[in-house]
Amino acid sequence: MADDSVKSEVSAQREEENGDSKSNEKTGSADGETAAEKQTVSKRQRKKLLKQQKWEEERELRKQRRKERKQQRRLQRHNHQEEEGGEALNFRKRPRREVTPSSLRLVVDCSFDNLMLIKDVGKLHKQIQRCYAENRRASHPVQFYLTSLGGQLKQSMDEKDKGWVNWKDITIKTEHYSEVVVKEELVYLTSDSPNVLEELDPKKAYVIGGLVDHNHHKGITFEKAKELGIDHAQLPLSSFVKMNSRKVLAVNHVFEIILAYLEKGSWKDAFFTVLPQRKGAVAVDKDGKSTQEKEEDISDSDSDPDTPDQTEKRAST
């Protein structure tokens, strides 16, 4: 019996030793796997983590450095202004232009919506946008009116320029201009009018036809003005400019020419400031001739054949 108990104790010890060795093997293998994982993952990841950790640790330091640089720049500007007697300009800010609003009214008549193709309506929309933008930056902005707004044009504006409802310094009406402005104050600007506009009357409202039709409805704005019995006139274009294209100008060109005239006080300067190069505009003199035509006349006179008297005189010598 004693031998059996000894044998059982010995076997139990052996089992414990085997179990410990197995657990040690498992632990050792797990530690080995962890170490292997660390080696495979960390070479790139560990470097990134260390870099991120360093970035976070230096965050406050960077913030402090930015603050110091800002204070240093402010101090330098202050010292420079003192050296210049306080008159140093801040070149990052553009000087504000002096703006003197004009009492002149410019009206874009949008009552020709049904006469235009949708692509031409889109062009008119862009021209109106240009008028609005130029008037906002002008030194003498006019009282801008948009009348008879509706149909295709309004749809285009709603779809492509939803911010138009927030436009400032503009009066937008669905009514016809004759219902918005007193008839006696209206002057329709049309190239078909026999009347030439010499001066702008600040008490008048000048109407520009909002029509892009590629001359398909020639003279329609002139006829409309006559039907309504309102005054009409054309810009004095022929008195100052000769062009290689028709005299009909885009809505925004007429608008911008008037803005330029209000600023410069000269029709000639206004025309040559605004008219695009493709119009081939050249200046004309009081006789209505361009510089090129005058040069051709001089050239022709120089090459005239001798008169009989000149021929006889040359022969006698």
Image: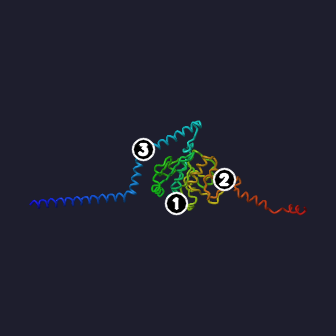
Real-space CA distance between mark 1 and mark 2, rounded to the nearest whole angstrom: 30 Å
Residue beneath label 3, please?
Answer: 60
Specify which label sits upstream in the sequence, 3 or 2.
Answer: 3
* Residue on which disc 1 sits: 120
Identity, as a three-letter code, of the amino acid under mark 2: Phe
Sequence-wise, the earlier of marks 1 and 2 is 1
> Which mark's residue is nearer the viewer, 3 or 1?
3
- The label shown at residue 240 is 2
Give the SS element for disc 3. helix
Under circle 2, the secondary element is helix
Callout 1: SS? helix
Amino acid carrying mark 3 in the image: Glu
Instruction: Report whether residue 99 is seen.
Output: no
In percent of the image, x 60 and y 49: which residue is there? Answer: 260
Q: Is 96 rendered above or below residue 290? A: above
Q: Is residue 58 above or below residue 296?
A: above
